[in-house]
Image (cartoon, helix red, strand yellow):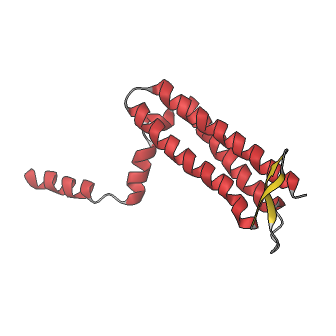
Amino acid sequence: MENTNEIKMKDSSKKSLICKFKLFFENDFFKNHIILWLLLFNFLANLSNWISLAIFINKAGNNIILHYNVYFGVDNLGNWKQVFWLPAIGSFLFIINLYLAFFFYKSQERIASYVLLLASFMIQINLIIGGIGVILINY
């Protein structure tokens, strides 16, 4: 009888990465409908920012306008690749807020996790507006 328990313990310690990934997503955090919708909105907003910048930014070797100020005009020129800092920062902040929301959800602080994911969505919306501004200035 002890041998079968030892075999089960050895099998559970050798779980594959896919099994651990599945166990992670079987958590209550990902079963909450509000969290799922907020995650979906965050992901779609960030993805739309990446795609819109990839489609509409001219990938020529010339510098493009990265920032325009009403008082001083163009105040920041740069390479076209620098535009992708906007969605990259959005992805980074989304991952940090997702981790914190997961941590607070496990601590039974559900409102805090909702607020973090909603704040992340607002950040994504602001970065989309900034990306649209860069696209409009350059066309």
Residue at the bottom extreme, as displayed: 61
Pick the residue in front: 34 or 65: 65
Residue at the right extreme, as displayed: 139
The quadrant in which residue 70 appears is: top right
At 14% across and 55% down in the image, what residue appears? 6
In the displayed structure, does residue 131 sit left or right of residue 100? right
In the displayed structure, does residue 7 sit left or right of residue 40? left
Residue 16, above or below 29: below
Residue 13 in percent (x, y) is at 25, 56
Residue 21 in percent (x, y) is at 43, 52
Q: Quadrant of the C terminus?
A: bottom right
The quadrant in which residue 120 appears is: top right
At 37% across and 30% down in the image, what residue appears? 107
Total count of labels: 0
At 56% across and 45% down in the image, what residue appears? 94
Pick the residue in front: 72 or 58: 72
- Say whether residue 33 is visible: no
Residue at the left extreme, as displayed: 2
Residue 91, above or below 54: above
